[in-house]
Image: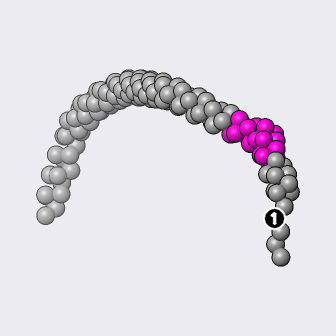
Amino acid sequence: MLDIHLPLMLFVLALFLTLLVLLNNMLFQPLIKFMDDRDSSIAKDLEAAKSFSGNTDELNAKADDIISNAKNEAASIRQKAIDDEKTLAASKVETKQNELETEYNKFVTQLNSDKENLKKTLLSQMPLFKESLKAKFSKL
């Protein structure tokens, strides 16, 4: 039923070993070399990424410093502009107050002179008023 052929078994064994050696040289070693190269490439890229991330932290710190300096400068410029406008407004208010004060003084002077003129006029017409009052009282 089953016959074992020794030369055929030796031939298959030799063929199997030859195939193993050929596959090792042509397939397995290049595949292992490719995987090792890929691992080293990945490791090198990770190291480069770490160095870039360290550099990024430094650049972020510099950017934060620049931004804070710019904010401080903007605040000082804004404060200077506000102070300048306040002084300008104060000077305008002061000039307007001086102008109004002089106009008020002129008005008071004119009012006093009109008051004096009115007194003089009334005093000069006082005898006429007395006469008209006497006439009215005499009719009663």
Q: Which residue is farthest bottom?
A: 1
Tell me if residue 110 is in the magenta stretch: no
Helix, strand, or loop for circle 1?
A: loop
| Label 1 Cα crowd, 10 Å radius (few <14 / some 14-19 / many 20+) | few
Left or right, residue 135 beside residue 70 = left
Residue 117 appears in view: no
The quadrant holding residue 103 is: top left
Q: Residue at x 22, y 43 (%)?
A: 128
Residue pictured at 81% horizontal, 52% vertical = 10
Residue receiving disc 1: 4
Q: Is residue 50 left or right of residue 88?
A: right
| Quarter holding residue 136 | bottom left
Depth order, front residue of 139/28: 28
Q: In this picture, is 123 found above or below 55?
A: below
Query: Where residue 25 appears, x then y in whole percent?
Result: 78, 37
Q: Is residue 97 visible?
A: yes
- Tell which of 1 and 18 is nearer to you: 1
Let me know if residue 29 is in the magenta part: yes
Q: Position of residue 44 (x, y in %)?
A: 61, 30
Work out whether residue 111 or residue 4 is closer to the camera in this orientation and state it.
Answer: 4
Residue 129 is left or right of residue 92, and the answer is left
Question: x, y percentage for residue 84?
Answer: 42, 23
Image: 132 above or below 107: below
Residue 39 % position (x, y): 63, 37
Residue at 70% x, 39% y: name it: 32
Q: Quadrant of the N terminus?
A: bottom right
Q: Quadrant of residue 109?
A: top left
Q: Which residues are magenta?
A: 17-35
Instruction: Give the mark count.
Output: 1
> Magenta: predominant secondary structure element?
helix
* Amino acid of disc 1: Ile
